[in-house]
Image (cartoon, rainbow, N blue to C red):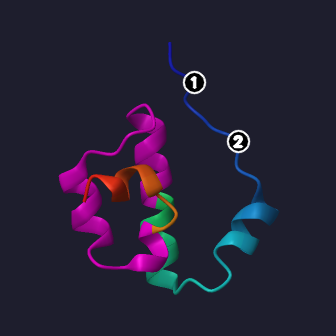
Amino acid sequence: AKDPAFLFYTSDFLTGTMFFSNEQVGIYIRLLCAQHQHGAMIEEKAFNSLVKDDELLGQNFISAMADR
């Protein structure tokens, strides 16, 4: 069975999202959760609907961006 949780390093998260807006942080955490729930790949349509043209968010999900 899939582990219901994943490691979350608060210091890394805060450092990595320091220059994100609050909205970007919310989208970012949703994308991390989606990756965990769906085996690391986020479906392209769902990814695009959340990220839209936000390059700051998109660059953190390179594999999904390659499909855009």
Residue 7, numbered label: 2
Amino acid type of the residue tagged 2 in the rendering: Leu
Left/right placement of residue 67 relative to residue 5 reads left
Residue 22, numbered label: none
Depth order, front residue of 42/4: 42
Question: Residue drawn 26% across and 45% down?
Answer: 43
Residue 54 colored in magenta in the image: yes
> Split into 4 quadrants, where in the image is the C terminus?
bottom left
Q: CA distance from mark 1 to mark 2?
A: 11 Å
Q: Residues within 10 Å of mark 1 (few under 14, many from 20)?
A: few
Amino acid type of the residue tagged 1 in the rendering: Asp
Left/right placement of residue 14 relative to residue 64 reads right
Left/right placement of residue 45 relative to residue 33 reads left
Depth order, front residue of 34/16: 16
Question: Residue drawn 52% across and 63% down?
Answer: 60
Secondary structure at badge 1 equals loop
- In the image, farthest residue toward the front: 66
Residue 37 colored in magenta in the image: yes
Left/right placement of residue 13 relative to residue 66 reads right
Image location (x, y in percent) of residue 9:
76, 54
Depth order, front residue of 65/46: 65
Q: Quadrant of residue 14?
A: bottom right
- In the image, farthest residue toward the right: 11
